[in-house]
Amino acid sequence: MLYHGRMRPSIKGALVTLALLAVAGLAGTLTFVKATGLSARATPGPLETSVARGLRAWSIPEEYEVRINPMPPNEESVRNGLTHFADHCASCHANDGSGDTELGKGMFPPAPDMRMDTTQDLNEGTLFYIIEHGIRFTGMPAWGTGTKEGEESSWHLVNFIRHLPKLTPEELEAMAGMNPRPPADVRQELEEERFLRGDDPAPTEAAPSHR
């Protein structure tokens, strides 16, 4: 709006302030990038962690925050979630949900300990959204398939995540047998089987351990 052929002082001052804030924000971002090298080896600080969690909470659509898990948290559902978690999630999150794996600790931010309140206090719809859609700029992929079966699997995972603080040694042992096996282990087993049969040595390349 013009005032005697000129921009109103209040509007001009606001625009100048916004421009200065934008320049300061850009300078701060460039300084942060240069100082950290965007290395994934660093540990997120309290401020960065708080801001990231706040942005994640703000970004999740409200419709998910009120969604209720249609799968009752019974033994069958927890078992389904356990099986899926062991095969798809444990390589980063560990069977016990601690995140204490080579992959999990090497990410930025590191895979969280899902037994702690920071995960357990999230509502069911938020956990479901994170599983289905993933989180940008982290190692969390989107597992959603857009199918009813896929959503049911995600809801079973939600029930299993709730069960993590009460995981038993027997369940952990069962999960260890369900984890994808490294190609080196598969190759060694093939070589041993061929040796016992008296066949030629096994090929050096093993088949993928899982899809």
Image: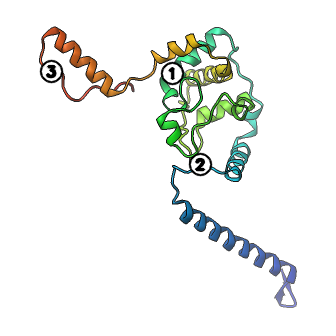
Image point (32%, 27%), residue name: 183
* Quadrant in the picture for the N terminus: bottom right
Q: Quadrant of residue 131?
A: top right
Which residue bears the numbered disc 1? 86
In the image shown, does 24 or 104 lie closer to the viewer? Answer: 104
Q: Which mark is residue 210?
A: none
Q: How many marks?
A: 3
The kind of secondary structure element at disc 3 is loop
Distance CA(mark 1)–CA(mark 2): 26 Å
| Residue 21, x across and y down, in percent | 73, 71
| Type of amino acid under label 3 | Pro
In depth, the one of 148 and 189 nearer the eye is: 189
Amino acid carrying label 1: it is Ala
Reading the image, the residue beneath label 2 is 43
Q: Position of residue 184 (x, y in %)?
A: 30, 27
Disc 1 crowd rating (10 Å Cα; few below 14, some 14-19, many 20+) is many
Disc 2 to disc 3, how far (Cα)? 45 Å
Q: Earlier in the sequence, mark 2 or mark 3?
A: 2
What residue is disc 3 on? Answer: 201
Q: Is residue 104 above or below residue 169?
A: below
Q: Is residue 94 left or right of residue 25?
A: left
Classify 210 as above or below 2.
above
Mark 1 or mark 3, earlier in chain = 1
